[in-house]
Amino acid sequence: MNEGQQTLLDFMRQESGKLASQTLTHIGLTFISLLIAIAIGLPLGILIAHKRKLSGGVLGIAGVFQTIPSIALLGFLIPVLGIGAKPAIFALLLYALLPIIRNTYTGITGVDATIKEAARGMGMSYSQILFKVELPLAMPVILAGIRTATVINVGVATLASLIAAGGLGEFIFGGISLNNTNMILAGAIPAALLAIVFDFLLSKVQNINFKKVRTGIKVMPVVLLVLACFYFIPSAYAGKLIAGFTPEFMGRRDGDLGLRDKYRLKIHTVVISDAVMYKAAYEKHLDVISGYSTDGRLRAFGLVVLQDDKNIFPPYYAAPIVSAEALKKFPQLESTLDILAGKIDDSTMTSLNYKVDYLHQSPQKVAMDFLVAKGLYKEPRNGNGGTVRIGSKIFGEQYILAEMYAMLIKGYTDYDVSTKTGLGGTQICFGALKNNQIDVYPEYTGTGLLVMLQVKPQMLDSLVLDKDKVYNYVRQEFKTKYDIQWLKPIGFNNTYALMMRRSEAKNLNIKTISDLKRYLEKK
Amino acid sequence: MIEVENLSKHFGKVRAVDGISFEVKEGENLILLGTSGCGKTTTLKMINRLIEPTKGKIIVNGKNVTEQQPEELRRSMGYVLQNTGLFPHYTVAENIAIVPQLLKWDKKRIADRTIELMDKLHLDHKYLNVFPEQLSGGQQQRVGLARALMADPPVLLMDEPFGALDPVTRFNIRKEFIELDELKRKTIIMVTHDVQEAFELGDRICLMDNGKIMQAGTPAELLFKPSGSFVRGFLKEQRLQLEFKAVKLNDIWDLLPSIKTRSSKEAIHCNCTVWETLEIITSGKENAVAATNPVNGETKTITFTQLMSTFYQYQNSEAV
Ligand SMILES: Nc1ncnc2c1ncn2[C@@H]1O[C@H](COP(=O)(O)OP(=O)(O)OP(=O)(O)O)[C@@H](O)[C@H]1O
Ligand SMILES: [Mg+2]
């Protein structure tokens, strides 16, 4: 525990620059959106408090905004507002709107009718009643709404990092995908502290008595404005090309760190979620993105992979891994699985993935079409020589491969097959294999090397240059450590890659990552 | 001063006020009396245009109210609400100063007038910077009255100003109210459902039922010349006490035995009611009181028995 804390502090100290800028961005995002939400929500709340007929509709619509899942909302906004601050602020604004409108409405309608009537009876005008009676009396309720909105916004603002708007989500999501607890905490703790501190401060504002509220109202916008300005401090820069990398890529040695180290690549980088990255590149919000070399979206969005001429990305050749027990139990298994060896290259896998992910064909149909086209397909024999259990992780490529293996086993042997697809991520799949819950699933050499074996950086450097070295290394290690057999590679390499729009890469004559670096350094 | 002609207010099918007419003379104190829901509040609020009439005309000071800015009209009329309607976020001083603020009086004038009224209404100065919730109901009511009187409006509209108070406080404030010089000059329309209060405070009373005026007249007229069974029925309870309150020494002056005495300093005015005179007699040691009639300069000494027998004599002569 003590040691863990130490390293968290170390991490925070080491990354203090990033931490500070992320925190400022986070505060800025929260308060810009809050400010706009108040500017819209307060008048709207006042309006519907006086024209009650409108209240149902307005509160209904604001309520609907609140129920849209945040990621989905960000996704909707990208085609309209692009990526970065604009859609993030807009989304936060929508979430903040409901509590502000609703509390303004409840606050004002909750003001005692006799007091309003007294005000009218004294001869106050509509606006005098609003500013001298209704708003001051509704203020504690309105402030409660602003307080709720602030806390919601501090939370939702972590998602801004998914669309390149920055904030503490960069650490949080990076940490989650890298399984780095210190990184997660370095983002999560400050975010939680921000929520607690703002909540506390606003509760103080809310509880001060009526007299001070009157001056408080005048101070509030100024404070909000100052806080909102934080956003502009860290984000004053520009560049030739913009790169969008996933939080995971940002924190990996075989990712952004390697690009800086080995290529000395200096590019204006934003952090963005995998879910929207490809589309953002297609829509020219981003020029360079990190991705997987066989991703179907490569084809869907007209992107090309830049050659990794200095070999910083370790090879991720796919091959079936099988428990030694299963190989003994099913003697024909190895030869059957090897039928696929060397049959699928990068571009073939990309188009198969494209069919599943984008054309929404079933993995089964795609697998069958491929096997038929290659002349590998055989009708199932319906034998009863035992059941082979095939697993897969939870994405299209793995589904396709699992289907292919199932068809081959049924066609070429007397074994039956049960498929356990969608076993989540690597850990779950590998765990199932180790615990004899499945017999075989497709794995990638790079994953074996980095996730299961967790090789040291020095070792990594000596290996990554050569795909065969990596394969042999993991094969050897898996055998001795886990009694698990790597069969022959299928052929394609689903590795990390940098990619660009095909047209832009062509215009700028960029084929390799070194080309990209040269282009960026050209004045 | 105030003329109401054929005034109606319908809320959907409910005829809250149904074609009423009345007049209030300058300096007069008119009471709108009636059971709950008979349209008193609605009538009052139409006068300062908090409610717009369905039909009819209201003329204040020769001007139709609909021709005036509602805000300006309201600033020229004091308005006292049933539940005080004090602003909870304003101090007592700020509450009292609302209308002068709207009229843009300068600070000094507001401060002076506030002190003047606080004194007249027996409110301690220590309450100036206190919020209304820290005051008792009676104190709040006084502040409400001070707020209405602050800009010295010629007209005062009061909706059950003592409605929320316990009987003792109510009685005391009502007494102060009668004695308050500020109020003597004002044209007042006051709503109540308390008959005793109406008789104590009203120069004239409009007895309403179901949106209509059943009878309008002085307390004595209502008592002794009721227009019908409703009015008689309404005043049935505590009738004797009401009669004591409705009849003034003036009314029975000639029937009083003329025991002339030398004019005494403590002599009471002859427009005191029989009720008030009785109170004075029973509270003193003398069992008698001197009263003067400024019209003919007479002063008479009245004893308890004399007063009672004269009153019965009068009562018999009036009853039809
Ligand atoms: N805004 C309104 N909408 C519909 N009906 C109303 C409205 N205001 C008053 N009424 C109805 O009009 C009638 C007269 O109401 P009003 O308030 O004038 O009575 P009131 O004589 O002041 O009674 P109370 O002594 O209880 O205050 C009642 O039947 C009431 O229900
Ligand atoms: Mg009423």
Image: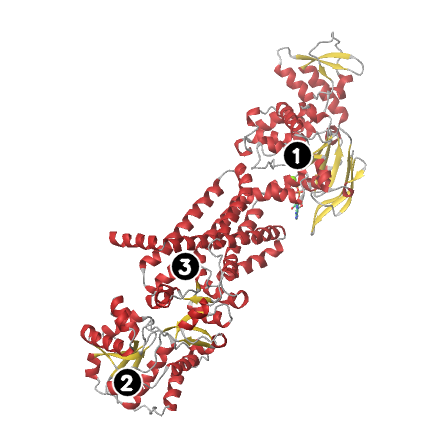
- At numbered mark 3, what does the secondary structure look like: helix, strand or loop? helix
Give the residue drawn at x 55%, y 60%: A61
Residue A368 position within the rendered picture, expressed as x and y whole percent measured from the top left: 38, 87
Residue A313 lies, with reference to residue B105, above or below; the image says below
Label 2: which secondary element: helix
Nearer to us of marks 3 and 2 is 3
Chain letter of the residue carrying label 3 = A
Q: Nearer the viewer, residue B172 or A308?
A: A308
| Residue B211 drawn at (x, y percent) | 71, 43
Q: Please tell me how crowded label 2 is: few (under 14), some (14-19), or many (20+) other residues with Cα within 10 Å.
A: many
Q: Quadrant of residue B40?
A: top right
Residue, disc 2:
A337
Residue A169 numbered tag? 3
Q: Tell me how far mark 3 sits from mark 2, CA to CA.
A: 42 Å
In the image, what residue type sits under mark 3? Gly
Given the image, on which type of amino acid does mark 2 rest? Leu
B254 left or right of A294 in image? right
Which of the two marks, 3 or 1, is nearer to us in this view? Answer: 3
Residue A78 is situated, as x and y percent measured from the top left of the image, at: 51, 66
CA distance separating discs 3 and 1: 52 Å
Q: Chain of mark 2?
A: A
Figure check: B17 above or below B307: below
| Disc 2 from disc 1: Cα separation | 92 Å
Identify the image's colour scheme: rainbow, by chain, secondary structure or one colour.
secondary structure
Task: State yes or no: discs 3 and 1 in contact (Cβ < 8 Å).
Answer: no
Q: Are discs 3 and 1 located on one and the same chain?
A: no
Other residues around mark 1 within 10 Å, as few (<14) / some (14–19) / many (≥20): some
Q: Secondary structure at mark 1?
A: helix
Q: Nearer the viewer, residue B291 or A302?
A: A302
In the orientation shown, which residue stands out farthest toward the top? B262
